Structures are given as structure tokens and as C-alpha cells.
């Protein structure tokens, strides 16, 4: 490499050398030297988002499927700020992401120009690693360190802040990240104690999260369940679950607090495998924060950053069960022209979902029966909103489609949440991504109307004005078309089935506005 | 008031009593008790935004016209995060805003539920006042303090974080903000020194910002200019300028650095009136950060938080000029069927702009001739993007229209920036606001292509992919219609003039996609 390389060029080379070859971007003036470097150096796929929430959500979806980080390219503190909500979701999913944030030149920020802000301060709450590079020759090593940091501790966000002068100054040096340290093996006593608890009898639950939700780990968990009678569960929201035909099913903890409490009632042993002890999403007057019974024994078999596969294998050996067959292909028939309900829509989806599809689930309240309803569909991955910050679905579908390399992505999308980041549809059109978006158009914040009812009040004029989206109704078909995505409306199950099937036969994105009565 | 009032009710009463009667909102579960209180208590106008960037941008536009704060209602840290970019702009405009941010119950956040985040940490960089209320009886006094804080120091953002239990617990008490302290009078020696500099001769500039850009203050500045030959200028971006027929004109510092340096070349005395010494928006290799000549004498007549009107009046008295007549009505004729350029579009706007319109200017690169070109239009207010965080225009138009009470708002909107927060159009339709949005549709990030050229490079494949928006082109007519806003396309000046005039005759919002060749 030439000594004449500038900082921006060393950044691109170091990211590529460290295995990062995809960059979701919304650049600004301070990132022009990075864009120029990308123009000169081959190998980085750059994907433009019309808003930074699109960029960060796409990076989250990408890494959940690719199992390696993408870079983002963000413009100054406010550009980062626009991406924070989906970074929050990514943090909750332990997703590796490398944020590259261009900022004011080192010597210029003291002048407090209009776009100057506390970029580091905004980055810290979502990042496990933050660094502001101060000279061109450090850019490469900092970039390699950022990639490394994103892959450690079970995965997380590394934010590299690059003042514009460190990008345009010469003296850049190329660096490569170190080989990743293997996840730590859990101690033998944790495995033995789990086995003892399971053998002692009583109602036991294995709460599986993170990497424990991949197919081989679920197979090990199924062996444990077969040997001990333990139930297999997951938290309400998960980064990625491998499921469907040929995979071992797992039950999801319901989101509504009363249902969640019921699901865990009577549990005596709660064994955590990459999961945390389940807590309520929000506090409610007079209801507990911890969802497991206070009398339950809670035992951590493995933390999220430990080797979950190894821990499950060792526990399965110890409790002594051989392999358990996973359910075979049992794809259900199309349900016919029934009412449009959560269950019936799930039935249609299960009947038509392509093999190895990726489902991106931001279905919120209408989707309550989707996860269970698609259990018998062909093998697929299920990606969810993990941090509760809505507006993740349409962006995540971008990244999942790019990482999925031809696998069909089906985004089950609540309308109110979709309106946070609808401009992500344009990137799907621009990149010709195989994404089918199903907008669950109920024209209200249904979850809030439910929560309001729980407060004990009947919605009055103001409350209805704050929680309904029907005046005017949003025309999702025109909205999709405005961003270049072919779009159509479905008002019945047969029409939904036809449009889904048609979308799966073509390449590129398609949007279906499913009208919920 | 009853002792049985809960915290949320005391919040609504205290905001109303402190003069805050408009609330831009995107509520979530933790704000349901606040919504319930709004249902029970009369007097607060609640306006729903489909995204928090809409909410905070609307609050900015509102206060710039109303000269008092609106409240925002935001949901937890990620909801605040979505609103930060427009709060950054509002901070740079010294706009008073009271953020009400619902959050996890005091006793629940330690459990680190999925939506928990560092809400205070994210609020601090944009806020001059941040407080997390810990018990119901403090909610009212904290709300009154927040309103007070938003009006102090020249205006700013107060962020009140309310855990859900302090809203639902009883014991709420109503409080009212104190009367605002008057802005401090500047010391006599500052006025005398300004007069001495102006009288000494040499090239002098009065750099006017903030409240100095209201009509009476501009009249005082015009007296000073007439007596001394000083030029009147403003920074590139301003919160609000009162201008047009009957107002004294002022020249805006250009945004491009070379033009800005030229505009200030030869200046010997730079007198700051609510302005800071001008600095470059970004650093560029080999170019200065400070825009005024290093040889210039820079004198602060008044800081933004001081009494600018009084300072200008005293200086005008001291330099001894009587009143100066402002330009009368000299509305230009329509320019006919010329090419669509920045100058010709400004000509059309000047010819048809209604009296007392509010112009919201996020026109970025195409709008370079708009400000000067509308100088002879009827009296109007000019609101700009102040912090460089794009996506402000469509939301600000909402707030300006509500505060303007029937005044027509004309939003001159760059397409790339508009795509950040296009869902704000829906709120314009829902609230039947008299907003005419002119989308300057050049289907590229024109400003970045200019900046890229300044880097010295010809855009290659990647750079073009990162800075053009034409594959696919965005159909703004469908986009507007999807959100319930009547929309049409203009490809010529006469068609633009016809559509503008038609929009001004009707009530409610209208969108014009102006195709830039």
C-alpha cells in the first residue's frame, strides 16, 4: 500500500480486510472523502437509504442473517440521532454493527458550527465501543478495532467517529481485525446444576434466546425436553429464530402481561440459555415486574456471550437423551374465504410461504397468532422487533434480503409502525430486493387502544384523535408506488393468497395492503 | 383542585396555567395516563404526528410564530431519539419547546425492560434544562419549571422525563410558571463602542440574528445603516425574518464558503447583534473556519439572550438618524414561460405570494436565489433550517400553520430533505392546515454533488449511486395523495403559478411537485 493513502482510503481497505463488505449509507458533506474512496476501491457494496433510520435498521437485518457486521455511513450527530431508534433495537438483539460517523474536522468543531453536536454522547447509550479518531494514521487500526469490538461479547454496536480531516489527510495505514475469540465455555457446575434441577422434577422451562434459537441448538434443547419433560420457550421478541419444517418448535412468551404471567404460572425451574429472566415490557399498577413466579428457581445455564451450543450439547448428554426427530413438512392447506383475522392470515401465510423465506415480523397487535400459526410452514427464519422502538420492519427487510442472497423476505408490517420509516421501500425498489411487504392496515394504533382500555378509560375525543389513523386513511398502494414498489390491495384471504403467490414468482419488491376490517 | 388529582392531570393543568395550550404528540404505552388526562381536561390542542421527527419539527415551527412554547409528547428514549434531529435545529434557533417524555416506571427501569435506554443522556445535548420527576406531587412544579426554563436565556429546550408511575399516582399539585424575567439590557459601553466603530468609518457590517430580525428591530437597524453606511446582514440560516413590503431588507450571508468569504471580504468592523461571529458550516482543506477577515474588529453589541430591540434603539439614537422609510409594495409581475431556475421560480413566488404568508425554507441548493428573489413580495415571515439537520421543512410547516391561525404557509422543500419526514404531510391533511408545499424535485442530493466536485473528483459509479434519487424517481404526487394531501405536478412556470394560486384560494394543504430539469 502506498504511503500516500488518505485516511478515508485506509478506512475502506481496513473494513474490507476485516470482512465488512456491505455499507448502508446516507452520506453528507463530511463523508465526501469516504465516498470518493469507495469510488476508487473495489469490493464494498454501498446501499443508499433516504433516512438514517433506514440505514441502521437495514444494518440490523443484514447482520442477523449474515452473522457478520455491515458498516453504516452516517452524517454528524443529527444523522446518528436519526438512526438511534433502530440502533437501540439492534443493541437489544446483540447485532454486530460498525457505525462510521463523519463529523466536523478536529480543528473546526471548537467553532461550534451549526451541525456540531455531542456525537459521542448520543452514540454511547447504544454502543459497546465508541472512538473518535484524531489523526489519519489511526483510521485503519480504529476501523479494525471497531469490527473486532462489534463481534465480541455476544455481538454489539461499535461507533467510529471520523472528523473530516482525518479522512482527507494522507498517512492512512491499513489494518485487519484479529481472529475472533471463541465464545467462553460455561463452567461444568452450571451444566450439572441445570441437569439436577431438571431431574428433580417439577415444572421446568428452558428459556432460549440468541444463538440458542438456531436449528442445531434447538435440536439439542429438544433432546433435553424429551429426556426431562422441560418446556422450551423464548422471550417475546427475538433477533432470529430458525423454525418451520425440519426444525424443533419453541413456544414464545406472549407480550400482554396477563398472558405472560399465565404462561409462566406454576413454573418451578426456569433455566436461562442466553436469555435474561423475563420482565414485563412496561410496569402496570399492581402487577409484578418479574414475570416468573417468585417461588421459581432461576438458573443461568449460559449467558448471551457464552457458548450456548456447547452448553446445550453438554446438558443434553448429561440428561441422557438421543436425537429427537423434528416435525416434517406439514404445510397446511389454504383456509379459503374466511374472515380476515390474525389466525386466518397466519393460515394463508403458512400455506404459501416459500422454502427458506425470511420473515421480518413487526406485526405488533394484529400479529399475535402469526408466530404459532406459521410453525408448520416450510423452514424459515423469523426476525422480530427486539427493542420496542417501532419502525424497524421495512428497513430490516432490506438488510435481510441483501444478506439472504435470493431468499424471499416477507415483512409482516403493522401500519402505524411502518409509517415511521416507509421511505425504506424506495431502497427495496432501487436495489431490486425480493421483499414482499404485507401492510396490516387497521388504521389505528391498536396496541395503544388496548393499553388505554387497560388504564380503565373509554377513549374520548382526544384519545381517539391520538390513536386512530383513519382521518384521512393512508393509501398504502399509492405510498408504495410513489417509492417505485409495485403495490396492490387485498380485502379478502383469497386475494391475499393470490397476491402473495404472485409476488413470490417475480423478482424485486412487492407491497400488499391488507385491509383489516 | 382535588387532592385526588393524579400526576398526569396536574401536568395538563400546570402546562395550561403556564400558557402552553398546544401539544404535538406521538404517544406510547407509558403516556396513556397523560392521554387520559387530556381527555378529561379541556383546553389543550393535541396534534398527532406519525413520527417523532414530525412532532419536534412542528413544535419548532409553532414557537417561531407563536413566540411561546408548545409541548411535545414523546415515548421513552427511542421516541425522543427520533425527534433529536429537529430538536437540534430548534436549539440552534433558540426555540422554546417543552418536551414531555414518558418513560419506564421509577421502580421498573432497574429491570432493564426492552425499551429502557438512557433518556436523560440523549436529551442533554439539545436541552438547556432536563429533569426526571420522581413522584406525583412534583409533576406540576416540574412542568411549570420546564415552561419557565424554555423561555429563559433567549429561548431553548426543556425536557421533562416522566416515569409512568408519577403520572398514575395520585397527589398531583398544580403549579404555574413565574412571570418571565425581561431580557437583560446591554451595558452602555457596548453601545458606545459600536457607535464609535461605526463613526470611525471603514467598511462596517451589522450582523443581525434572532429577535433583531423582527420588523421593528430591522427598522432601527435601517436607521443605523442610513446614518453610518453600515451594511445589514444576517447569518446564512435564521429562525425567523420579518420581511417583504413595508419591512427593511437585510442581506443574507451565502452558504457556499467561497461566496461567504467574498461577501465579508474587506469588512473592517463586524458588529454582532444577537449573532455569533460567522463560521464555515464545514471545514475545507486550506480554507479558513472564521468567515470574517482576520483583520476585522469584531464587537458584540448584544448577545442572543440580551434585549436586542433596546440595544438597536439606543445605538440608532446615538448615531443620530431619524426614521427611514421601508420599501413599499413593489410586487413583481409573473415572469412568463421562462426556464425553471432558482431565480425564475423566486419570481413566480414573489408575484403570487399572499399577504402575511409564512415561508418555510428548506430549499437547500436549488433555493439559492429564493431569499433575495422574494424581497419585493408582500410582507411575510421567512423560517429556515437552522441546524443543518435536514427533514425540518414539512414538520415546521405544521406548527407554523397552527400558530399562524389562517396565515398561508408556503414550504419550499428540497426533495431529498423532504423524504426524511414526508409522513408529516398526513398531519397537514388531518388538521386541514393551509400549507402549500412546493417540492423542488431534482431527484438528487444536489448539494452533495457540489461538495463532491469541491473534493476534486468526478463522481464514479458508487458516488452517483449514493447521491442520485432517480432510480427509481420518487412520485411526489402519489406520495402526497397517499397521505391525503391533494397534489399535482408542475413542469413549467405558468403551471407552477396556476397551481400556487389555486392552492391559495382553497383551504387545507396542497402539494406541488415542481420538476427541476
Image: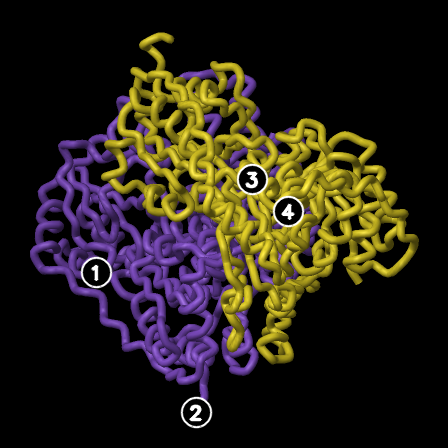
Chain colours: A purple, B yellow
In terms of secondary structure, where does tag 1 sit? loop
- How would you rate the neighbour count of disc 3 (Cα within 10 Å): few for under 14, some for 14-19, many for 20 or more? some
Kindly identify which numbered label has been placed on residue A2: 2
Q: How far apart are marks 2 and 3 (CA)?
A: 63 Å
Q: Which of B457 and A216 is in front in this view?
A: B457
Tell me if residue B369 can be seen. Answer: yes
Q: Say whether residue B21 is left or right of residue B363.
A: left
- How would you rate the neighbour count of disc 2 (Cα within 10 Å): few for under 14, some for 14-19, many for 20 or more? few
Which quarter of the figure is the C terminus of chain A placed in? top right
Q: Which of A48 and B89 is in front in this view?
A: B89
Kindly identify which numbered label has been placed on residue B224: 4
Q: How far apart are marks 4 and 1 (CA)?
A: 72 Å
Confirm whether circles 1 and 2 share one chain: yes
When the figure is inspected, residue B325 is found, relative to residue B517, above or below; the finding is: above
Q: Which of B25 and A67 is in front in this view?
A: B25
Residue that badge 3 annotates: B314
Circle nearer the N terminus (1, 2): 2
The residue drawn where x is 40% and y is 42% is B127
- How would you rate the neighbour count of disc 1 (Cα within 10 Å): few for under 14, some for 14-19, many for 20 or more? many
**Of the two numbered discs 4 and 1 in the rendering, the one whose residue sits closer to the viewer:** 4
When the figure is inspected, residue B336 is found, relative to residue B110, above or below; the finding is: below
- How would you rate the neighbour count of disc 4 (Cα within 10 Å): few for under 14, some for 14-19, many for 20 or more? many
Amino acid at each position: 500500500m502506498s504511503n500516500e493513502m488518505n485516511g478515508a482510503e485506509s478506512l475502506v481497505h481496513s473494513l474490507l480486510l476485516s470482512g465488512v463488505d456491505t455499507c448502508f449509507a446516507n452520506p453528507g458533506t463530511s463523508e465526501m472523502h469516504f465516498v470518493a474512496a469507495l469510488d476508487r476501491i473495489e469490493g464494498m457494496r454501498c446501499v443508499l437509504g433516504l433516512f438514517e433510520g433506514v440505514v441502521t435498521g437495514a444494518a440490523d437485518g443484514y447482520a442477523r442473517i449474515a452473522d457478520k457486521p455491515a458498516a453504516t455511513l452516517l452524517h454528524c450527530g443529527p444523522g446518528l440521532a436519526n438512526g438511534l431508534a433502530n440502533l437501540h433495537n439492534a443493541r437489544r438483539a446483540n447485532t454486530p454493527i460498525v457505525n462510521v460517523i463523519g463529523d466536523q474536522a478536529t480543528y473546526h468543531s471548537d467553532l461550534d458550527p451549526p451541525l456540531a453536536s455531542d456525537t459521542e454522547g448520543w452514540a454511547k447509550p447504544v454502543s459497546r465501543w465508541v472512538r473518535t479518531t484524531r489523526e489519519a494514521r489511526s483510521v485503519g487500526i480504529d476501523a479494525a478495532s471497531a469490527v473486532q469490538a462489534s463481534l465480541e461479547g455476544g455481538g454489539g454496536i461499535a461507533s467510529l467517529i471520523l472528523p473530516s480531516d482525518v479522512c482527507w489527510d494522507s498517512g492512512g495505514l491499513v489494518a485487519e481485525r484479529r481472529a475472533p475469540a471463541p465464545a467462553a465455555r460455561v463452567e461444568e457446575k452450571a451444566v450439572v446444576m441445570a441437569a439436577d434441577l431438571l431431574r428433580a422434577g417439577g415444572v421446568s422451562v428452558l428459556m432460549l434466546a440468541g444463538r440458542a434459537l438456531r436449528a442445531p441448538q434447538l435440536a439439542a434443547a429438544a433432546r433435553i425436553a424429551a429426556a426431562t419433560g422441560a418446556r422450551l420457550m423464548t422471550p417475546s421478541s427475538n433477533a432470529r429464530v430458525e423454525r418451520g419444517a425440519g426444525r424443533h418448535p419453541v413456544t414464545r412468551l406472549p407480550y400482554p402481561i396477563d398472558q405472560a404471567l399465565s404462561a409462566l404460572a406454576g413454573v418451578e425451574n426456569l433455566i436461562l440459555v442466553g436469555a435474561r429472566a423475563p420482565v414485563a415490557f412496561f410496569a402496570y399498577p399492581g402487577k409484578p415486574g418479574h414475570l416468573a413466579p417468585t417461588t421459581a428457581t432461576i438458573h443461568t445455564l449460559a449467558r448471551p456471550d457464552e457458548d450456548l451450543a456447547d452448553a446445550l450439547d453438554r446438558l443434553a448428554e448429561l440428561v441422557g437423551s438421543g436425537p429427537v426427530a423434528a416435525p416434517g413438512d406439514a404445510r397446511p392447506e389454504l383456509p379459503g374465504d374466511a374472515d380476515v383475522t390474525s389466525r386466518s392470515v397466519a393460515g394463508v401465510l403458512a400455506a404459501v410461504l416459500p422454502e427458506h423465506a425470511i420473515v421480518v415480523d413487526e406485526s405488533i397487535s394484529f400479529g399475535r397468532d402469526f408466530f404459532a400459526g406459521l410453525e408448520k410452514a416450510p423452514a424459515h427464519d423469523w426476525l422480530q422487533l427486539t427493542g420496542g422502538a417501532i419502525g424497524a420492519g421495512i428497513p430490516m427487510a432490506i438488510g435481510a434480503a441483501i444478506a439472504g442472497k435470493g431468499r424471499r423476505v416477507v415483512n409482516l408490517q403493522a401500519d402505524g409502525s411502518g409509517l415511521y420509516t416507509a421511505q425504506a421501500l424506495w431502497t427495496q425498489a432501487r436495489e431490486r430486493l425480493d421483499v414482499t411487504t404485507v401492510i396490516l392496515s387497521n388504521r389505528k394504533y391498536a396496541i395503544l387502544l388496548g393499553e388505554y382500555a387497560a388504564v380503565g378509560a373509554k377513549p374520548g375525543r382526544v384519545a381517539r384523535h391520538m390513536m386512530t389513523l383513519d382521518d384521512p386513511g393512508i393509501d398504502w398502494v399509492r405510498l408504495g408506488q410513489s417509492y417505485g414498489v409495485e403495490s396492490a390491495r387485498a380485502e379478502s384471504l383469497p386475494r391475499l393468497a393470490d397476491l402473495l403467490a404472485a409476488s413470490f414468482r417475480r423478482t424485486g419488491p412487492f407491497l400488499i395492503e391488507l385491509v383489516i376490517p
